């Protein structure tokens, strides 16, 4: 029985008799779906006690409801709401038409509806998912992490720290992150430069929300990571797009835009561009650094895939060079440890970090402190470095196998440039294949292509999709190629 | 050694000799702090290989650096950066003054700096924290939750679900939340009405960000939950404040404002108002519902403390009545389970939920799915209900003891109205005591008062602070009163 006491309020000053006030309110509760058809009503004496009136008044109210056919009296079982009422819809959360419950969807976002529809599909366990380029959940050191979680669960100062506000993450993880970033990426930062976030996406959202105001111009590549686009659109930004070729973002196009108008922010993934996987050439990187130092604009450098490099050495982030505090560097622990870990980081000047922390608190008063201690322990003990090294080897093999099979069997149907690293290939279908149809037919064959894609026929990167290979075993890779052969031939 | 290959880029087309290009860039790396004093440099042959030049060029570059006194040659150990360089500051994240790295802090937020300074204090383990009204971490069923975590860690479909996007939380927890809300709060919702968030704060932020645009007028109480205020300020809202008296928000003041101008949103905690703990009277609630149905504005109903009620029955949320989809109802699982659990929920019409999910994805692509399964299991198994019942008993006893001791020993020094529920008292000091001084002196005596407070001498709620009693054992409660006696007498 729903606890509907207190929903029935009587007022002696009204002209309506108390009994009728009660019966009217019960009708409304039934109409609103709070009391459902078939539900028992309280005995008259209980309801009288609950709402502090006398029993006779409740009896009159129930008689009223009986005569209106809302309820029925069952011998020895009291009153209940009739079963055969016309189907009642819950009304409380139904907006009447005159009230605009939905904000407008910006057109650029509405165009992504197709993508959303696909990536939200639920996939049966025996079917294969090719994702956007995520690590293999089977390689996540879950049980090591659980052991550490268990150990930290009894850590009293950790538990007590939940009584304070968050200042950008657990101090132990902020310090460990600074040391991890310095030794792996050649930066020179300390804990005051670090914010721990729920994944790299939150880091992007925080940076965009903090600096970009409605009407500000920003620059992204074409195509671009869609959730960066959407973060800018949410902030009310005007998006300018520059091309991506085999050397990464075409910096000359950025310079043209900078000469024409004030730009507030650039979003770029120079290492393995998303979605195309292209790594920016050294010349372009130097040129970009010059522009950053010449013009006043912020840069979000998204280095989501830094630690996964195959043959070549990694290219140091832009943030490792002098940039006058203009670069906000973001990355992901989830990519390193496993997809169930939702944690990332943002590296910036202390002034920016203070503002980011302030905004982050509005979104998330406190992070997942327990898990933050676990990740800090993995960094300090060296377990994270070992895990990266081990998984990198496996992922390199998978990339080799996948590239080999695609070239061997599907060379006429699709094309890709072997990326220098990362966990996905960017595959362009031959013009005679329609990507959307291919995705649909693959789905019907138990192969779910859920990576980012570009359909735009006018874009040199059109008819292309990211195929994440890292989460696929060798056997699964062979099956993927097999299904693609069926679908493409 | 930092991996500074690729930071050194040579260009044959420049007039500067290659060796000088190399030495200049190494100087810059030292100046930028990427290469630190005392660091070893690569052997000439290795560096030549790394940057694809010949060894003699590198030798010339190193000679250059030797002659400029940047590096030194150690017999048999190669080259290293000199130890006694003038102290070099890391430059990369230092903004030059001309570049505004910091956005403006709105004045209303700047006024809260005092509060921030206090609540971020770190407290030694043997000292006592009186927080804003959080549950006791010692009562969190941590080990039951770890057992369930371990069980879910091997759940393959859970792990694979990390490869899809999030649609407002794990389906199992969305359904369990709907059923929990319906049975405890008299709502009539299903999983399509539910968004799982990282704490109630994220729910507030999402609702505010979605609907409030710069220049929109909103209404809050005075005083108000500061992070709701800050969320509105971040969105660029103009805040209108209405008073709170012994019956809660003064609805007549709200009506006056509604008659004067278009209001976009109201933020209200009708059950246990934050910070004052006052519960809104039935008349005021009815009147507020009438206004909601008469005027077009959204309402965030924050019911952070619903499940903690002492003597009286809980008052059903406004959201349980007909409101045309205008109420966005938010609550917290962290309050119910324990402070280490950072999870909350938002309940709204399906149209609003769809938009909230879209925005939530920009902030947090995916929730903490593992923990979401654990909480869902606690709801379905009945463990959550039992936990609430058990802790509620303990918290009611603590409230009784704390109220009793405060009245017994400090009746002349402070005043509070016993709240109908919740986990904190709202205590007003006698006018002769200065709250800020009291907090400072208590801190010096090992008692850290970290609850929300109101200093404003012109506010009837001025010179008051929230004293959270739920996280204190009986012994700690006695100690708190003891220290307060010392400080206040």
Image (cartoon, coloured by chain):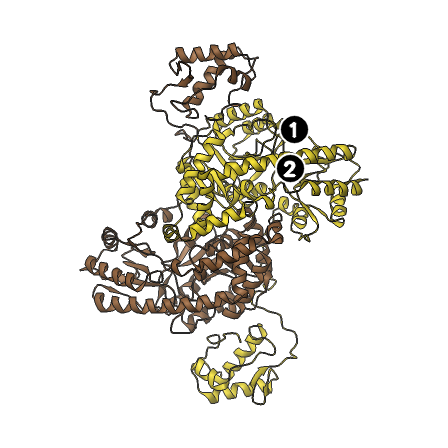
Chain colours: A brown, B yellow
Q: In terms of secondary structure, where does tag 1 sit?
A: strand
**Which residue is depicted at the point 50% across and 81% down?**
B21
N-term mark: 1 or 2: 1
What is the total number of numbered labels drawn onto the structure image? Answer: 2
Specify whether A234 is left or right of B121: left
- State which chain disc 1 sits on: B
Specify whether B21 is left or right of A248: right
**Which residue is depicted at the point 53% across and 54% down?**
A150
Q: In terms of secondary structure, where does tag 2 sit?
A: strand
Q: Position of residue B158 (x, y in %)?
A: 39, 50
Residue A223, image quadrant: bottom left
Q: Which residue is mark 1?
A: B245
Q: Position of residue B274 (x, y in %)?
A: 61, 36
Question: Do the dots labelled 1 and 2 sit on one chain?
Answer: yes
**Which residue is depicted at the point 19% across and 58% down?**
A486
Residue B220, image quadrant: top right
- State which chain disc 2 sits on: B
Residue A133, placed above or below residue B465: below
Looking at the rendered image, the quarter that the C terminus of chain A falls into is bottom left
Q: Name the front one of labels 1 and 2.
A: 2
In the foreground, B101 or B313: B313
Specify whether B155 is left or right of A407: right
**Which residue is depicted at the point 63% across and 73% down?**
B88
Q: Position of residue A288 (x, y in %)?
A: 46, 67
Looking at the rendered image, the quarter that the N terminus of chain A falls into is top left
Q: CA distance from mark 1 to mark 2?
A: 18 Å
Dot label at residue B424: 2
Instruction: State the residue lying farthest toward the left.
Output: A489
Dot label at residue A405: none
């Amino acid at each position: 029985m729903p606890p509907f006491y207190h929903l029935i309020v009587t007022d002696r000053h009204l002209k309506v008799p108390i009994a009728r006030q009660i019966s009217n309110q019960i009708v409304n509760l039934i109409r609103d779906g709070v009391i459902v058809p078939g539900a028992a009503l309280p005995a008259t004496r209980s309801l009288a006690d609950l709402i502090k009136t006398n029993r006779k008044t409740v009896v009159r109210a129930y008689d009223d409801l009986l005569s209106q056919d809302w309820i029925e009296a069952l011998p020895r079982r009291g009153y209940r709401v009739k079963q055969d009422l016309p189907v009642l819809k819950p009304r409380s959360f139904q907006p009447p038409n005159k009230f605009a419950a939905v904000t407008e969807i910006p057109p650029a976002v509405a165009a992504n509806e197709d993508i959303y529809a696909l990536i939200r599909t639920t996939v049966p366990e025996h079917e294969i998912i090719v994702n956007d380029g995520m690590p293999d959940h089977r390689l996540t050191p879950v049980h090591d992490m659980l052991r550490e979680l268990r150990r930290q669960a009894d850590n009293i100062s950790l538990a007590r720290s939940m009584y304070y506000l968050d200042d950008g993450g657990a101090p132990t993880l902020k310090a460990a992150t600074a040391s991890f970033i310095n030794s792996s990426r050649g930066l020179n930062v300390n804990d005051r430069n670090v914010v721990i976030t729920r994944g790299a996406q939150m880091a992007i959202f925080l940076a965009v929300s903090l600096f970009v105001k409605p009407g500000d111009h920003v620059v992204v590549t074409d195509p671009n990571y869609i959730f960066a686009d959407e973060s800018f659109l949410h902030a009310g930004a005007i998006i300018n797009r520059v091309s991506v070729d085999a050397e990464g973002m075409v910096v000359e196009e950025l310079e043209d835009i900078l000469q024409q108008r004030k730009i507030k922010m650039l979003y770029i993934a120079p290492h393995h561009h998303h979605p195309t996987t292209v790594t920016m050439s050294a010349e372009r990187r130097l040129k970009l650094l010059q522009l950053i130092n010449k013009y006043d604009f912020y840069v979000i450098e998204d280095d989501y895939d830094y630690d996964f490099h195959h043959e070549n050495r990694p290219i140091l982030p832009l943030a490792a060079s002098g940039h006058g505090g203009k670069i906000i560097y973001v990355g992901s622990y989830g990519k390193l440890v496993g997809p169930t870990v939702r944690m990332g980081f943002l590296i910036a000047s202390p002034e920016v970090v203070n503002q980011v922390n302030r905004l982050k608190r509005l979104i998330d008063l406190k992070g997942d402190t327990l898990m933050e201690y676990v990740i800090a322990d993995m960094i300090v003990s060296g377990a994270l470095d070992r895990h990266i090294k081990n998984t990198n080897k496996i992922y390199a093999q998978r990339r080799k196998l996948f590239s080999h099979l695609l070239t061997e069997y599907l060379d006429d149907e699709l094309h890709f440039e072997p990326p220098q690293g990362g966990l996905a290939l960017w595959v362009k279908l031959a013009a005679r294949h329609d990507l959307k149809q291919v995705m649909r037919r693959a789905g019907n064959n138990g192969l779910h292509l859920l990576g980012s894609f570009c359909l735009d026929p006018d874009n040199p990167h059109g008819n292309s999709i990211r195929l994440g290979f890292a989460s696929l075993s060798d056997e699964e890779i062979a099956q993927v190629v097999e299904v693609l052969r069926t679908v493409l031939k």
